[in-house]
Image: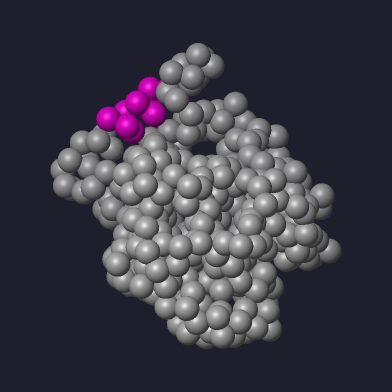
Amino acid sequence: MKRILIVMHAMEIGGAEKALLGLLENMDYTKYSVDLFLLRHQGEWLKYIPKEVNLLPESASYSCIAVPIKEVFKKGKIRIAWQRYLGKKNARSRVKELGVSKDNGIGIEFSHKYTVKCMPMISDREYDAAISFLTPHYFVRDKVKAKKKIAWIHTDYSKVAIDKESELPMWAAFDDIVAVSDGVKEQFVKIFPTLAEKVTVIENILPVQLIQKQAKEPTDIPFSQENINLLSIGRFGNAKNFDNIPEICKRVKEEVSNVRWYIIGYGPDEALIRQKIEEYGMQDTVLILGKKENPYPYIQACDIYAQPSRYEGKAVTVKEAQMLGKPVVITDYATAKSQLTDGVDGVIVPMDNEGCAEGIIRLLHNPGKMKQLEYICRSKNYTNTEEIVKIKKLLN
């Protein structure tokens, strides 16, 4: 039996966390002994980790990551707090030097890069393979003994400002790099061409049993059948573009008066989204439902699932909506064509607000097309369970 270690930040509600659950649900535990190490034992989805998985104890040192530095000082982890401070200070200098936007991955990369030297080994075992499931990947690189090390990439690197010079040695230390779509691989290889031979595409595996079971539960806010109900799910940040939903919805409502657009999620852009809702007078039309541990009844109840993102790796929620037989509309972000086939199992609309609204309106005026999209989605298999074969090849 092969020993496998998987390292993840936490089990909060998110696409990467759901992809991890899908992977764990499909592992063959007669062949693999799986240890899971979480930096923090936090998140609504902790309880869904399969019982066959050995969840390693939380480490007082690793739990100091992604919490305020002052809390780290209070815990008495002075060295870690100091390195966190240095990482933050140098990340700011590097962002200024590179002239990149505020929406960048340099802060978290430097946080891990600077603190890794203070961290204990994650385990005293030597593993056959170790998987770092979410970037940055310094802890698996330096604090795990394994015959093979594998790093996952979930996002479109062309849309996230990074420090290429700093990250290259981190990625280069791994034996294999897994991209969650062809588009993600393509954009990653453009930035790191010397790593091309290491990159394999393995799409996210969905935990189908969990999704189908939870989709049957009731919603706490019933969707009116008299309305056309749109739904979007995701973290309230720049990538998801939810701050533009109020304007898009206003344009749609001018043609379809009974439209309602619900948003599930949480994050730093919530105040901005609420400001835009008021600015466009959409208080009764664009409704924020907040964080939902179980979003599937809402997907089941909606008429259209919309993902108006600025960029994506491969949106797990889009696949989940397709699995539940919903017409899906996504914007034309760089990896959109690896997400769905336009006009077949979803619709790709322009990124600009006017074009996005027009695309949604066309679909709403074509109920036959909506029925066709539903039929095709219900007839296809979106679980990606066959991808476990590729994972086995890497592990073996």
Quadrant holding the N terminus: bottom right
- Counting from the top left corner in percent of width and height, residue 372 is at 59, 85
Front residue of this view, candidates 223 and 395 = 223
Which region shows up in magenta?
79-89
The relative height of residue 241 versus residue 37 in the rendered view (above or below) is below
> Which residue is depicted at the point 75% across and 44% down?
47
- Counting from the top left corner in percent of width and height, residue 218 is at 75, 52
- Counting from the top left corner in percent of width and height, residue 256 is at 45, 67
Front residue of this view, candidates 227 and 345 = 227
Q: Is residue 201 left or right of residue 37?
A: left
> Which residue is depicted at the point 46% across and 41% down?
267
- Counting from the top left corner in percent of width and height, residue 107 is at 34, 40
The relative height of residue 39 versus residue 225 in the rendered view (above or below) is above
Q: Is residue 228 left or right of residue 50?
A: left
Q: Main secondary structure of the magenta part?
A: helix
Q: Is residue 37 left or right of residue 343?
A: right
Q: Quadrant of residue 193?
A: bottom left
Front residue of this view, candidates 42 and 84 = 42
Residue 203 seen in this snapshot:
no
> Which residue is depicted at the point 47% across and 71% down?
329
Residue 372 magenta-highlighted = no
